[in-house]
Image (cartoon, rainbow, N blue to C red):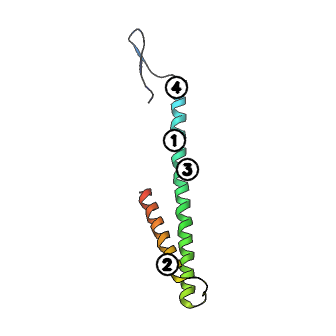
Amino acid sequence: MPRYEEQTATGFTHAPGVVENFLIGLRVVWRECRAMGARLVRAYERRALAKRLQEEYCRLGRIQAGHDCQTSRALVMGQIGLLKDELDALEKEAS
């Protein structure tokens, strides 16, 4: 953690200079950019999982209607459960 006031040899304090303030500002901007990037990645992941969950529900509908006989209903239900759990975990992490 940077010190904002430093004691000099004579006992007087001085405020940080222009370069020190600039470097502190750069660190703050860097941290904010990293946080924003992390939020964007989490939002993208949630959207991708929600899209995949919707596809699995469509697949389940085709199985129920009898149009897709090759895919196992139990497998699709397992995928749906897994995707719901992942979405719930991401929502808890985001809040």
Residue 77 badge: 2
Q: Which residue is painted at 56% across and 80% down in the image?
A: 58
Density class for disc 3 (Cα within 10 Å; few <14, some 14-19, many ≥20) is few
CA separation in Å, label 4 and label 3: 26 Å
Is residue 89 depicted above or below 54 in this figure? above
- In three-dimensional space, the C-alpha distance between marks 2 and 4, rounded to whole angstroms, equals 58 Å
Q: Is residue 62 left or right of residue 10?
A: right
Horizontal and vertical percent position of residue 68: 60, 86
Mark 2 in CB contact with mark 1 (< 8 angstroms) = no
x 61%, y 85%: residue: 70
Whether pointer 1 and pointer 4 mark residues with C-beta atoms closer than 8 Å, the reply is: no
Looking at the rendered image, the disc whose residue lies closer to the viewer, 4 or 3, is: 3
Amino acid bearing label 1: Arg
Residue 20: assigned label? 4
Q: CA distance from mark 2 to mark 1?
A: 41 Å
> Which is more N-terminal, label 3 or label 1?
1
